[in-house]
Amino acid sequence: MTTQEQDRTILPLNLKSIIQLLNTSGGEYAPLQYTMVQPSPGETEIHIDIQQCDPDSIQVDINETRIAVNAKATFQFQPSTNSSDSITLERDTQTQIPLAPGIALQDIHSTITSDTIIIHIPLHHPVS
């Protein structure tokens, strides 16, 4: 017996083609993914991707142990090139970044660009 796959699409879109984009760890749809860089010995920067996020929904909470970032992310998907209709997929996203003990929370500040929040963490060395 030979089994053949038939196209029985209910919706005019193939979810298999976008599933990678919806995974927070795969594809290019990865809101709130972050990288850490050290531009100087006295500072660490955390670059957080906010490309797919509604700017008004972004919340940053900092305490002694972590930085928590929450936002509402959206993705516009057009089912076909022949259609002007689009589907908006939306979900809440979050990330938590652990902080080392002894960081002066009052010295942490951030800047924002069109696609990135940069959190600046000055590193204070004890005076001997």
Image: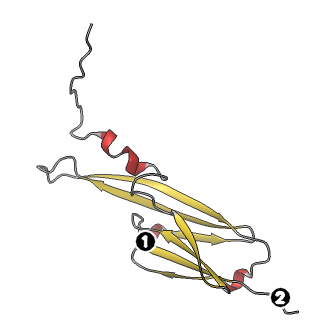
Please state which amino acid type lies under the numbered disc 1: Pro
**Farthest residue toward the left?**
82
Q: Secondary structure at mark 1?
A: helix
Which is nearer the N-term, disc 2 or disc 1? 1
Quadrant assignment, res 13: top left
The residue lying toward the viewer, choosing from 105 and 39, is: 39
Question: In the figure, 36 relative to 10: above or below?
Answer: below
Q: State the image quarter where residue 94 is shown.
A: bottom right
The amino acid at mark 2 is Pro
Where does the C terminus fall, quadrant-wise? Answer: bottom right
Q: Which residue is mark 1?
A: 55
Query: Residue 108's x, y, as percent?
Result: 65, 82
In screen coordinates, is 114 left or right of 59? left
Q: Position of residue 46 (x, y in %)?
A: 57, 74
Q: Position of residue 98 (x, y in %)?
A: 69, 65
Q: Residue at x 55, y 68 (%)?
A: 35
Q: Residue furthest bottom?
A: 127
Point 74% across, 82% down: residue: 104
Q: Nearer the viewer, residue 9 or 124?
A: 124
Q: Residues within 10 Å of mark 1 (few under 14, many from 20)?
A: some
- Judging by the rendered image, the residue that carries numbered circle 2 is 126
Q: Which residue corresponds to the image point at 41% horizontal and 73% vertical from the top-left?
A: 115
